[in-house]
Image (cartoon, rainbow, N blue to C red):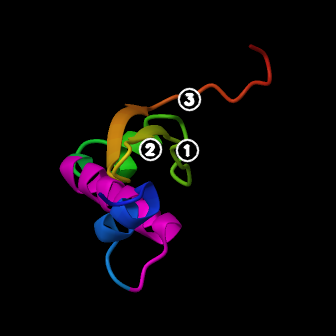
């Protein structure tokens, strides 16, 4: 039987820390999201619809990380709440 640390080491590619392994998966998931919606959400026409040609869009992204250090993108919000109110 492997210890939990040994099992996780087998899941992480050689030379990467567990944190880097998770971050790389998050970056990959975000890249897939941007490519999937690049013609609808990430266009100047869409940004200009907010009243400015030099605008930006802020997205909120939720991830889950399972016990095997696999990352799952669970939700993308187009208008995440940024208030300090609960």
CA distance separating discs 2 and 1: 7 Å
Q: Which residue is mark 1?
A: 52
Pointers 2 and 1 in contact (C-beta within 8 Å): yes
Q: What is the magenta range?
A: 15-36
Q: Secondary structure at mark 1?
A: loop
Q: Does 9 sit left or right of 58 as displayed?
A: left
Q: Which circle's residue, 2 or 3, is located before the other in the chain?
A: 2
Q: Choose between 32 and 79: the one closer to the eye.
A: 32
Q: Which residue is mark 3?
A: 80
Residue farthest to the top?
86
- How far across and how far down the image is residue 83, in percent? 75, 24
Q: Which residue is mark 2?
A: 47
In this picture, is 17 found above or below 76?
below
Residue farthest to the bottom?
15
Q: Is residue 63 magenta?
A: no
Look at 43% across and 79% down and name the residue there: 16
């Amino acid at each position: 039987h492997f210890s939990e640390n040994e099992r996780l080491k087998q899941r992480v590619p050689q030379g990467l820390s567990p944190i880097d392994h998770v971050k790389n998966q998050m970056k990959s998931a975000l890249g897939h999201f941007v490519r999937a919606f690049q013609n609808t959400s990430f266009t100047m026409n869409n940004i200009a619809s907010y009243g400015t040609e030099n605008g930006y869009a802020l997205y909120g992204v939720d991830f889950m990380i399972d016990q095997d250090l696999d990352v799952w993108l669970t939700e993308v919000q187009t208008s995440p709440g940024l208030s300090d109110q609960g």
